[in-house]
Amino acid sequence: MNCVSILKNKTVQLVLISTAQIFGISYPVHAETPTESKSQAIAPPWELYDTDKDDYISTEEAAAQKMPSETFEALDIDRDGRLNKDEFSKAPPVTGTGR
């Protein structure tokens, strides 16, 4: 067993961390940052949907971006057949794959 495989062992890691804590030794901790995650939730950009720049998203503009009609209807709170920025801001994030 080489040093790397020993350090990958969870029991060994726990013992090393516990020992370090007992003696007050600091150690680096690695946490996954948002840029490292496999998938990220991204708010859909208003500009991508409001293609005619009239400050509303029509059913046609939403459909062109593959927004499901059920989603559009759920977001259209005032039932005027178009989404304003406040309604659109309640859209669920789109999940994309990270690098």
Image: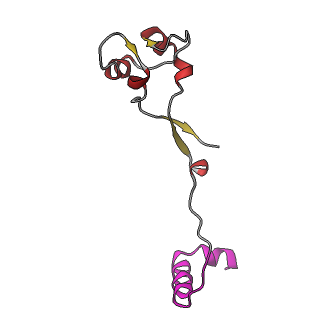
Where residue 14 sits in the image (x, y, percent)? 51, 80
Q: Is the magenta stretch mostly helix, strand or loop?
A: helix
The segment highlighted magenta reads 1-27
Q: In this view, does 44 lie above or below 27?
A: above
Quadrant that contains the N terminus: bottom right
Viewer can see residue 35: yes
Q: In this view, does 23 lie above or below 45?
A: below
Q: In which quarter of the image is residue 28?
A: bottom right
Query: Horizontally, is 51 left or right of 93 in the view?
Result: right
Query: Horizontally, is 25 left or right of 64 in the view?
Result: right
On whether residue 89 falls in the magenta region, the answer is: no
Residue in the image at 29% along x and 16% along y: 78
Which of the pair 88/2 is nearer the observer?
88
Residue found farthest to the bottom: 23
Residue in the image at 56% along x and 47% along y: 38
Where residue 82 sits in the image (x, y, percent)? 39, 12
On whether residue 13 falls in the magenta region, the answer is: yes
Q: In which quarter of the image is residue 76?
A: top left
Residue found farthest to the right: 2
Q: How is the image coloured?
A: secondary structure
Quadrant that contains the C terminus: top right
Which of the pair 84/70 is nearer the observer?
84
Viewer can see residue 2: no
Where residue 8 sits in the image (x, y, percent)? 60, 72
Where residue 94 sits in the image (x, y, percent)? 48, 33
Which of the pair 67/25 is nearer the observer?
25
Q: In this view, does 24 lie above or below 29?
A: below
